[in-house]
Amino acid sequence: MHGALWEQAANAPFALYGLTSDFEGSRMLAAVGHHGDVVNLVELGHGNRWSAPFVWVQVAVFGPLHGAPSGDRALGLPGGEWSADPLPMIANQVLDLAGARFATGEEVQLAIHELVADGFGEERLLLDRRAQPFRTVVAGNAWAAMRDLEPDHLLYVVATNIAPADIALRKLEDIEDYTSTDD
């Protein structure tokens, strides 16, 4: 039996991606995010970040990244164009996997800013059996790789203790192999 978050992820309004069957570690639903009532983030976890050998690969889709004005604006309610930037969240996840610790929220924000300000590298990851370019950021033994998906979504991977060349991504038909983390 699956929980409510698993059902939301399974019925997300966008394609989901995970690792191919070549990766033998455990699989789980790591997170589901929302923008209002709409699922806008699904993170699928692979491996185990809590016990040795600490290999963790999180594959996520976030979006849409932009939105048009809502119809509520005509009624005098707040509305208008909006955009979402998942990069600070992704950078924070990389820093967390790298073991970075901070005393204050200000220090966290500074570290995120510095990681992003260092610029992006590029790695080619296997995506549906084809090597595709991804923008990358690295902190210690942790890294993130990001690639735009049409329409207006972001596919990203956050990982530790595994090289980008050692993983292969695929579009998922279903998420039956991913255990639920809720309920």
Image (cartoon, rainbow, N blue to C red):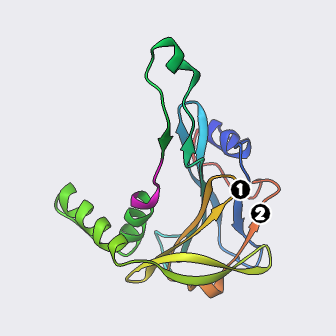
Q: Are marks 1 and 2 in contact (CB under 8 Å)?
A: yes
Q: Which residues are magenta?
A: 84-88
Q: Amino acid at mark 1?
A: Leu
Secondary structure state at the residue bearing disc 2 = strand
Please name the residue shown 48% across and 40% down the image. Answer: 82
In this figure, which residue is indicated by the disc labeled 2? 171
Q: In the displayed structure, would residue 8 be above or below residue 44? A: above
**Mark with earlier residue (1, 2):** 1
Would you say residue 44 is visible in this rendering?
Answer: no
Crowd tier of the residue under label 2, counting other residues whose Cα lies within 10 Å: few below 14, some 14–19, many 20 or above: few
Q: For this view, does 33 lie left or right of residue 150?
A: left
Secondary structure state at the residue bearing disc 1 = loop
Which quadrant does the C terminus fall into? top right
Please name the residue shown 63% across and 58% down the image. Answer: 28
Which quadrant does the N terminus fall into? top right
**Chief SS of the magenta region:** loop
Q: In the displayed structure, would residue 66 be above or below residue 160? A: above
- Residue 68 x/y as whole percent: 57, 36
Q: Amino acid at mark 2?
A: Lys
Would you say residue 35 is visible in this rendering?
Answer: yes
- Residue 24 x/y as whole percent: 70, 76
Whether residue 135 is in magenta: the answer is: no
In this figure, which residue is indicated by the disc labeled 1? 16
Judge by depth and name the residue closer to the eye, 179 or 146: 146
Please name the residue shown 58% across and 21% down the image. Answer: 71
Please name the residue shown 58% across and 84% down the image. Answer: 123
Q: Quadrant of residue 27?
A: bottom right
- Residue 38 x/y as whole percent: 61, 35
